[in-house]
Image (cartoon, grey):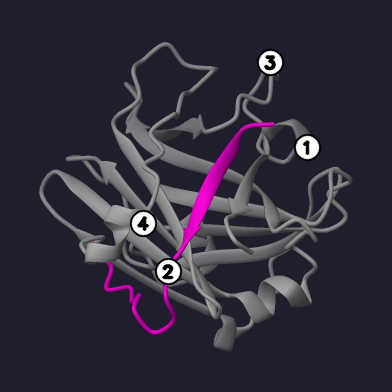
Amino acid sequence: MKTYKVNKVDDNDMDINGKGDHPLWEKAMLLKDFSSPWHHESVENIEFRALYDSENLYVSYKVKDDSLHIDRSDNSKKSVDNSDRVELFLRSDHHLDPYYCLEMDPLARVQDFIARPNRQFDFKWDWPKDGISLKSQITPTYFCVELALSLKSLIQFELIQPDGSIEAGIYRAKYNQQPNGLFEPTWITWVDPQTDRPDFHIASSFGKLQLEEY
């Protein structure tokens, strides 16, 4: 299983602003190992970083993109589903019963839902509001999304294993306009699930975030 080491920082030193420019991000490992196993085109640069302290897990995505597609119809979860976005799925074990999905767009909107095997999705479910913070920034050449999840909520959902690991899927959806004028997603992932068709809702698409010194 692919593993990303999440370094620990001192309490009260870390904060998110959506820009990915906090000095402590320099202490995080840089993950750029992303691909689209089902498409031939090259993947634009994606930078993933994560840190944690005694209160929160912090995640940063910086994605090169100068042609964003964002559905601004409203702020519903459906609009997020039709937009360029980054995604983080978290599970307690390989049975995926349940697992938790966070799909975040460049406007810091989130489609959060709980899921179970065979694509059973509950979109009425929300991550506890006091356990999540999300901020973002859009520039002419890239966008950044920063996420903070409380360890309290991760423990509540039994997502932190006794050894300090969190099993996670890290993904990206990039919408491209087709000759017919419609926009279709290219699916990008950290872990190749070895499927014939794009599918992140499968045990083989997950890797591991290892909390150092947990």
**Which quarter of the figure has residue 1?**
top right
Which numbered circle lies on residue 9?
Answer: 2
Q: Residue furthest top?
A: 40
Between circles 3 and 2, the one closer to the viewer is 2
Crowdedness of circle 1 by 10 Å Cα count: few (<14), some, many (20+)? Answer: some
> Residue 9 at what x, y percent from top left?
42, 69
Q: Secondary structure at mark 4?
A: loop
Q: Main secondary structure of the magenta part?
A: loop
Q: CA distance from mark 3 to mark 1?
A: 15 Å
Q: Is residue 207 left or right of residue 72?
A: right
In the picture of the structure, the residue carrying the numbered disc 3 is 196
For the point 23% across and 40% down, the residue is 65
Q: CA distance from mark 4 to mark 3?
A: 28 Å
Q: Residue furthest front?
A: 213
Between circles 4 and 1, the one closer to the viewer is 1
Ranked by sequence position, the earlier of labels 2 and 1 is 2
Query: Does the CB distance between marks 3 and 1 fall below 8 Å?
Result: no
Q: CA distance from mark 2 to mark 1?
A: 30 Å
Ranked by sequence position, the earlier of labels 4 and 1 is 4
> Residue 162 at what x, y percent from top left?
80, 61
In the picture of the structure, the residue carrying the numbered disc 1 is 203
**Image: 37 above or below 88:** above
Instruction: Residue type at mark 3: give it.
Output: Asp
Q: Secondary structure at mark 2?
A: loop
Between circles 2 and 1, the one closer to the viewer is 2
In the picture of the structure, the residue carrying the numbered disc 4 is 71
